[in-house]
Image (cartoon, helix red, strand yellow):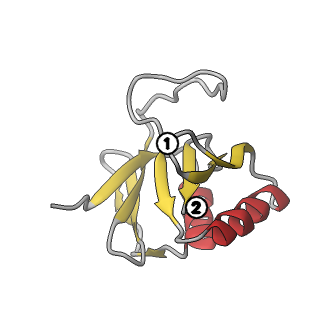
Amino acid sequence: MKIEHIAIWCEDLEKMKSFYETFFNAKSNNKYENPKKGFSSYFLSLSEGARIELMKMDSVETLPKDVQKQFTGMAHVAFSLGSVEKVEALTESFASNGFEVISGPRWTGDGYYESEILDPEGNRVEITT
């Protein structure tokens, strides 16, 4: 069994698509649109086969954005990069491009080397070895 995809509701599909394409080398399909429902989406494919579905629908409410608070539901999505050096380089790339680095890079108590950043809409993204 494997995870096929995760889905993220978005306010700005194009900005989110660009983020995941730029920093995670995701490849996008063509935009799907359903004007009757006010729905649009992209599927982004990652190199190992998992996908991210970015979705927008006018009727979906926005959660409060407070990096100090966590809410019930999905906590973060994590990407394994394969090495300490890659985690450090990507963390620096996020920071130099204006994205907030919440923590790291650091070794965790359970043995992971990781950083946690916020994507353009405040979703937590973890990068690890």
117 is higher (above) or lower (below) than 68:
below
Residues at marks 2 and 1 touching, judged by CB atoms closer than 8 Å: no
Q: Quadrant of residue 44?
A: bottom left
The alpha-carbon separation of the residues under discs 2 and 1 comes to 36 Å
Q: Nearer the viewer, residue 108 or 121?
A: 108
The label on residue 57 is: none
Q: Residue 127, position in %: x, y? A: 57, 57
77 is higher (above) or lower (below) than 93:
above
Q: Amino acid at mark 2?
A: Glu
The label on residue 14 is: 2
Q: Nearer the viewer, residue 108 or 4?
A: 108
Q: Residue 73, position in %: x, y? A: 38, 29
Q: Nearer the viewer, residue 56 or 106?
A: 106
The label on residue 110 is: 1
At 80% across and 61% down in the image, what residue appears?
Answer: 97
Q: Residue 95, position in %: x, y? A: 80, 56
40 is higher (above) or lower (below) than 81:
above
Quadrant assignment for the N terminus: bottom left
Q: Considering the numbered disc 2 on the image, is that residue within a helix, a strand or a loop?
A: helix
Number of the front mark, 2 or 1: 1
User: Quick one: which residue is furthest to the left in this view?
Assistant: 1
At 54% across and 76% down in the image, what residue appears?
Answer: 25
At label 1, counting other C-alpha atoms closer than 10 Å, the crowd grade (few under 14, some 14-19, many 20 or more) is: few
Q: Quadrant of residue 31?
A: bottom left
Q: Residue 53, position in %: x, y? A: 38, 58
Quadrant assignment for the C terminus: bottom right
Q: Quadrant of residue 92?
A: bottom right
